[in-house]
Amino acid sequence: MTEIADNTPVIIGVGQYSERVDQPGYEALSYMDLAGRALAAAIADSGAGEPVAPAIDTLAAIRAFEMSRPDRKPPFGAANNVPRAIAKRVGANPKRAILTTTGGQTNQQFVGEFASAIATGKSECAVIVGSEAISTVLALSAKGERPDWSEEVEGDFEDQGFGVDGMMEHALFAHGATGAIPLYALAENARRAKLGKNLNEYRRDIGELFAPFTKVAAANPHAAAPVERSADELAEVTDRNRIVAEPYTRMTVARDQVNQAAAIILASAGTARKLGISKDKWVHIHAVSAATELMLSNRPDLSANPASIASVEAALVRAGKGMDEIGHIDFYSCFAIPVFNQMDHFGLSVDDPRGLTLTGGLPFFGGAGNNYSAHAICEAVQAARRDRGAFALVGANGGWMSKYATGIYSTEPADWSNNDRFEKLSMADDAVPLGTGPFENAIVETYTINNAKTGNVAVWLGRNEAGERVCGNADLSHDTTRKLFEGGDPFGAKLAVHQDSKGRNIGRVF
């Protein structure tokens, strides 16, 4: 492209803001204040200053973790109108205000949706912004302090709902796999079984994957845990680095105790010109693709996440690039397996010279709830500006590898005249049927031992006599069963199953 059309969407500003409870000057900011600081930083980053805020016609606020489920409420309260509360902090009054659904892919997907809206003339300047203040909530609660973060803000907004219906694994929840850690561990152990590795070998693989991430986090001023660690430190099981759910040690799972916010500003090239934003600041959106996965229990291969692969592949195709042509990469890393899945498919290694994270990754930079990938996009934009002409890829994951969105960025212009650079992919139709009634036997496909406060719970997924996918608990009071599961190799074991008084499936090895 020799001339960039006025309706071409470009990123004109990115901003991050963070604070740690142990830092000098710590302010204990609320969700809305953190987000407001990040948006102010993005406006400053554009170089255009005050004229930017009045130009914002659309603002999407990423739903914070403590607003992400019907049964959760922010303990200190929050604004009744989160997007407009954030907008108010920078003097913006967008025509369209959105509170998004739940999911770590949301911010990346909205880049595509807003870019498409700009390309078709439905928007001129749009913002994606989010924050987490979980670390502050915990720190103040521990001291018995309860500040009031509620506020009333006038104006309409679109509440897009929680968006968790396709992630509700009710049978697994009933058997103790009630959060991200045990659910990802089930997939992780399925991959370990496929590779034929024991627990110690696989923990070492995770340590070797994440050790380079810690080096990036150590150099990132916004990182929640800016400490470089070796593969041995990450893999070794100690009192401080205990097992949270096999095969995960505490240091290798997403860190949600953060105070972090990030914001991204998109505008049409015409608006960027009117605002006087230098082309040195413009970063072009070459492709965004979004995909939805089958529920974990329905997946033919419990270790795989084909929707994420399809998303990345689709974005590469639309950008006209191969993975070897991407200069900067951030794969969503709440746990190891979303990264391993991409590595396995694209033949990447843990010591890839490009690195596999731009932030330091969710266990070390911090897992800023649904908003982590906004930080990754901010880093991708800055990398593209420094390394002009290079391409940066961000892979954003939501749920239990339930949703995925991929974005590709560069200072090289992208032609949006056909509005064909944003794509939503169809869900696979090869779901494994789920067993719904009692059954007597099952073959174990994968498992985890979830180390809960109330005691260890072994959860397994497998097939019943009819070939349906079923789940249950291993009877750890049965010596042979306990030794098999604690030894880390129950794959393929045949279990005799009975239902307890709560209707849970309890399995013992024959």
Image (cartoon, rainbow, N blue to C red):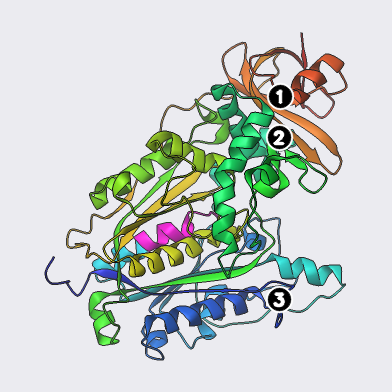
Circle 3: residue type: Gln
Amino acid type at mark 2: Glu
Tell me: 48 left or right of 73.
left
Image marks 1 and 2: residues in contact by CB distance under 8 Å: yes
Kindly indicate the quadrant of the structure image that contains residue 202. top right
Q: Which residue is mark 1?
A: 488
Instruction: Find numbered disc 1 in the image and state the secondary structure of the residue it sits on.
Output: loop
Residue wearing tag 3: 23
**Of helix, strand and loop, which one carries label 2?**
loop
The Cα–Cα distance between marks 3 and 1, rounded to whole angstroms, is 41 Å
Question: Where residue 221 sits in the image (x, y, percent)?
Answer: 58, 70
The residues colored magenta run 102-112
Asked whether 225 falls inside the magenta stretch, the response is no
What's the mark number on residue 246?
2
Q: Report crowding for label 1: few under 14, some 14 to 19, many 20 or more residues within 10 A (C-alpha).
A: many
Please say whether residue 103 is one of the residues in the magenta stretch: yes
- Residue 335 as seen in the image, left or right of residue 450: left
Helix, strand or loop at label 3? It is loop
Q: Position of residue 16 (x, y in %)?
A: 52, 73
Q: Considering the image in quadrants, where does the C terminus appear?
A: top right
